C-alpha cells in the first residue's frame, strides 16, 4: 500500500510514462491493423458504392430525359398526323359534297334540257296538227266557196300539205 500512497497522476514518473507510451503504441498498432484498415476499406467501399449509385442515378435521369424528349417528339408527330388526317377527311368530305352537288346540278340541267326538248317536240307536233286541221278546214271552205271538190282524199291532203309548206308558219 505504500506503493499507492506514492502514486501521483499529475506528476508521473518515467516508468509509468514509458509503459503507458508502449501500451498506447501497441494498442494503436493493433487497432490500426484490425480496426482502422477495415473501417477505412469499408468507408472506401461504401464511398465507391455511393458514387456508383449516383452515377447510375445520373445515367437513369439522362435516359429518362431522353425518353421524355422522344415521347414529346412522338406526341407532336402524332398530333400533326391527326391534324393531317382530320384535314384530309374534311377535304374528302367537302369533295364528296361538291361532287354530289355538281352531279345533282348536272342531272337537273339534263332533266330541264329533256323537258325543253319534249316541250319543243310537243309544240311542233301541236303546230303540225293545227296546220293540218286548218288546211282541212281551208279545203272544205274553199270547196264550198268554189264548189269544186278535189278528186280524192289523198289529193286533198297533198294539196293541203303543199299549201302548209308554202305558208311556213312558225
Image: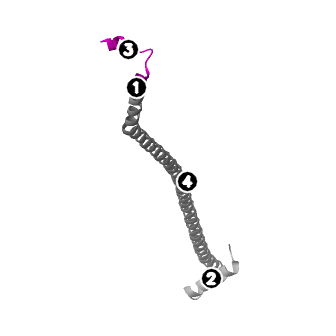
Residue picked out by circle 2: 161
Residue picked out by circle 3: 7
| Rendered image: mark on residue 80 | 4
Q: Could you tell me which secondary element the residue under label 3 belongs to? A: loop
In the depicted structure, whether residue 99 falls above or below residue 158: above
The first of marks 4 and 2 along the sequence is 4
Task: Kindly report the distance in space between the C-alpha atoms of the residues bearing marks 1 and 3.
Answer: 15 Å
For disc 3, the neighbor class at 10 Å (few under 14, some 14 to 19, many from 20) is few
Based on the picture, tell me whether residue 10 belongs to the magenta stretch: yes
The first of marks 2 and 1 along the sequence is 1
Task: Kindly report the distance in space between the C-alpha atoms of the residues bearing marks 4 and 3.
Answer: 95 Å
The first of marks 4 and 1 along the sequence is 1
For disc 1, the neighbor class at 10 Å (few under 14, some 14 to 19, many from 20) is few
Q: Could you tell me which secondary element the residue under label 4 belongs to? A: helix
Q: Position of residue 31 (x, y in %)?
A: 38, 34
Residue at screen point 39% across, 27% down: 19
Task: Kindly report the distance in space between the C-alpha atoms of the residues bearing marks 4 and 1.
Answer: 84 Å
Give the quadrant of the C terminus: bottom right
For disc 2, the neighbor class at 10 Å (few under 14, some 14 to 19, many from 20) is some
The first of marks 4 and 3 along the sequence is 3
Q: From the viewer's perspective, tell me whether residue 9 is left or right of residue 106.
A: left
Q: From the viewer's perspective, tell me whether residue 158 is left or right of residue 10.
A: right
Amino acid at each position: 500500500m505504500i506503493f499507492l500512497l506514492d502514486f501521483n497522476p499529475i506528476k508521473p514518473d518515467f516508468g509509468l510514462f514509458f509503459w503507458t507510451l508502449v501500451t498506447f503504441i501497441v494498442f494503436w498498432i493493433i487497432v490500426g491493423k484490425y480496426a482502422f484498415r477495415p473501417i477505412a476499406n469499408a468507408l472506401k467501399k461504401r464511398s465507391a458504392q455511393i458514387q456508383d449509385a449516383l452515377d447510375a442515378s445520373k445515367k437513369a435521369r439522362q435516359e429518362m430525359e431522353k425518353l421524355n424528349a422522344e415521347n414529346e417528339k412522338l406526341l407532336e408527330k402524332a398530333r400533326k398526323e391527326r391534324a393531317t388526317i382530320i384535314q384530309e377527311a374534311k377535304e374528302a368530305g367537302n369533295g364528296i359534297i361538291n361532287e354530289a352537288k355538281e352531279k345533282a346540278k348536272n342531272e337537273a340541267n339534263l332533266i330541264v334540257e329533256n323537258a325543253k326538248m319534249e316541250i319543243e317536240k310537243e309544240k311542233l307536233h301541236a303546230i303540225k296538227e293545227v296546220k293540218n286541221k286548218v288546211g282541212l278546214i281551208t279545203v272544205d271552205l274553199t270547196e264550198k266557196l268554189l264548189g269544186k271538190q278535189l278528186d280524192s282524199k289523198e289529193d286533198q291532203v297533198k294539196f293541203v300539205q303543199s299549201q302548209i309548206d308554202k305558208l311556213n308558219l312558225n
